[in-house]
Amino acid sequence: MTNQFNFEGTVKALQSGKKLNGKDGVLTSLIKQLTDLVLQAGGS
């Protein structure tokens, strides 16, 4: 399974005015994506 970090989606969300922090914020989503990628890489 190959997953990539969605940098463009993160930038677009910030540009469209989405909050950086909070439950539905860009930073929360970013941390989740990165954590999932690290956990997947560790299990390989």
Image (cartoon, rainbow, N blue to C red):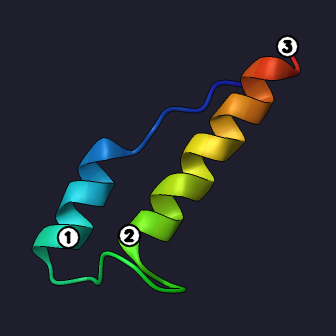
Most extreme residue toward the left, as rendered? 15
Residue lying at 59% horizontally and 32% vertically, measured from the top left: 3
Would you name the residue on which mark 1 appears? 14
Residue at the far right: name it. 43
Give the mark nearer the N terminus: 2 vs 1.
1
* Sooner in the amino-acid sequence: mark 1 or mark 3: 1
Q: Answer above or below: position of 44 versus 33.
A: above
Which amino acid, mark 3? Ser
**Is disc 2 surrounded by few (<14), some (14 to 19) or many (20+) residues within 10 Å?**
many
Q: Which residue is disc 2 drawn over?
A: 26
The quarter of the picture where the C terminus appears is top right
Residue drawn at the location 39% of the way across and 45% of the way down: 6
Q: Position of residue 29 (x, y in %)?
A: 50, 64
Which three-letter amino acid code belongs to the residue tagged 2?
Val
Q: Residues within 10 Å of mark 3 (few under 14, many from 20)?
A: few
Q: Amino acid at mark 1?
A: Leu
The spot of residue 40 in percent (x, y) is 77, 29
For this view, does 40 lie left or right of residue 27? right
